[in-house]
Image: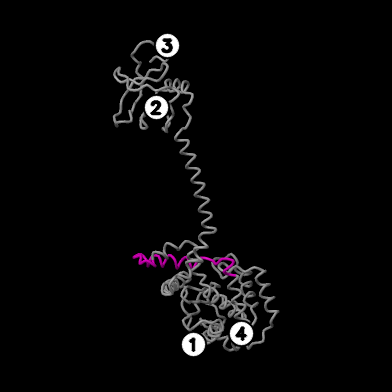
Amino acid sequence: MDSGTSETNSAATPAPGAVFFDGASNRRRAVALKLSDALEIREDGALLARWAFADIRRADSPFGLLRLSCLTAPSLARLEIRDAQLTAELVARCDALEADLPNRRGVAAIVGWSLAAAVSIVLVVLFGVPLAAERLTPLVPDSFERRLGDVAEAQVKVLFNGKPCSNAAGQAAFEKLVGKLRETAGFDNSVQSGVLATAVPNAFALPGGKVFLFDGLLAKAENPDEIAGVLAHELGHLRHRDSMRELIHNGGTSFLIGLLFGDITGSGALIFASRSLVTSSYSRDAETNADTFAIETMHKLGRPAKPMGELMFRVTGKEGGKGLSLVASHPLTEDRLARMDKADAAGPASGQPLLSPAEWQALKSICGSGKGKV
């Protein structure tokens, strides 16, 4: 190989490992290179290409290989060089080697589009998904929502190992309490409710008009107003269809659309969606609206709303952070409790007790224990 600019012999010295692709065929050519006033590429002495140094550009290549292209050559033409000395000499002669580097533009483009995609995702999560949830929720058919509620009910019983409590006297007291709340809140008899025998202090509103009270919460209650307030709060979630809205918000849109259009995997989607409902929590706005509904319902009955907050605070103090609880899905702050207290002060309770002392004790014992514990 002769790299001098004054080279006069016509034969180029073979360059070890130099491979040329002419861009017109997929033929791999072992070539000899000559560096004079331009880069000459020869095969068996025949000149294949002559590239001006100013037109040579580096192409994307792995470590240890110099891959070159030329602005005046076919777009697919490539020269590959592994010889370290020749690589160094070429780099020294090609002043514009790094200009318009495809791989650098590609990396910059990838980074730019990735950032744009990340920003788009954040905007969709913050604004698009909540808006979609608001718009889609009223469009969900009642039949689908009831179906989802049936599957979610089964999931609740499995996840919490809870069996329905059916003590006759306790059930009668519970139905009386729920009946008053349901009638006052403007619900019909399609709303279903029950008490489940599990020590977890919780209550749930599920799609399709289902409300469940856990015996663990009932055991901590000190009077009927506390339980009534919690049940009214759950009825508020039903009224506003918060469960369905949160399901769409938290990523169940694809499952919902699949089911609406006859997806044959609907059963699996329902199970996934129902588990999401059981383990998710409501937004701050949903909780505020449910509180408002509970306050209004309790006041229509002539009963205070603050006992609901006192019960939830009682659970918070004793069991906060210990797994699933009412507080996990219904976070209660001092502001919310103060709001209930202020609302009660505006109109003191004047209605009759929702349950008699005997009925209250029967309700506490609905799961078979005198203290209402499992």
Classify the position of the N terminus by image quarter. Answer: top left
Q: In this view, does 184 lie to the left or right of 244?
A: right
Q: Mark 3 or 4 closer to N-term?
A: 3
Residue 283 covered by magenta stretch: yes
Query: Is the residue under label 4 in contact with that under label 3 (CB below 8 Å)?
Result: no
Report how far apart the C-alphas of labels 1 and 3 lie in the structure.
110 Å
1 or 2: mark nearer the eye: 2
Q: Position of residue 282 (x, y in %)?
A: 55, 67
Name the residue beneath numbered marker 1. 168
Q: Mark 1 or 2 closer to N-term?
A: 2
Report how far apart the C-alphas of labels 1 and 4 lie in the structure.
25 Å
Report how far apart the C-alphas of labels 1 and 2 lie in the structure.
93 Å
Residue 194 covered by magenta stretch: no
Q: Mark 1 or 4 closer to N-term?
A: 1
Mark 2: give few (<14), some (14-19) or many (20+) Cα within 10 Å. Answer: few
Q: Where is residue 63 in the image (x, y as percent from the top left)?
A: 43, 31
Report how far apart the C-alphas of labels 2 and 4 lie in the structure.
88 Å
Name the residue beneath numbered marker 2. 72
Vertical placement of residue 114 versus 23, above or below: below
Mark 1: give few (<14), some (14-19) or many (20+) Cα within 10 Å. Answer: some
Identify which amino acid the numbered label 3 is placed on.
Ser
Identify which amino acid the numbered label 2 is placed on.
Thr
Identify which amino acid the numbered label 4 is placed on.
Leu
Helix, strand or loop for disc 2:
loop
Name the residue beneath numbered marker 3. 6
1 or 4: mark nearer the eye: 4
Mark 3: give few (<14), some (14-19) or many (20+) Cα within 10 Å. Answer: few
Name the residue beneath numbered marker 4. 301
Q: Mark 1 or 3 closer to N-term?
A: 3
1 or 3: mark nearer the eye: 3
Vertical placement of residue 69 versus 347, above or below: above
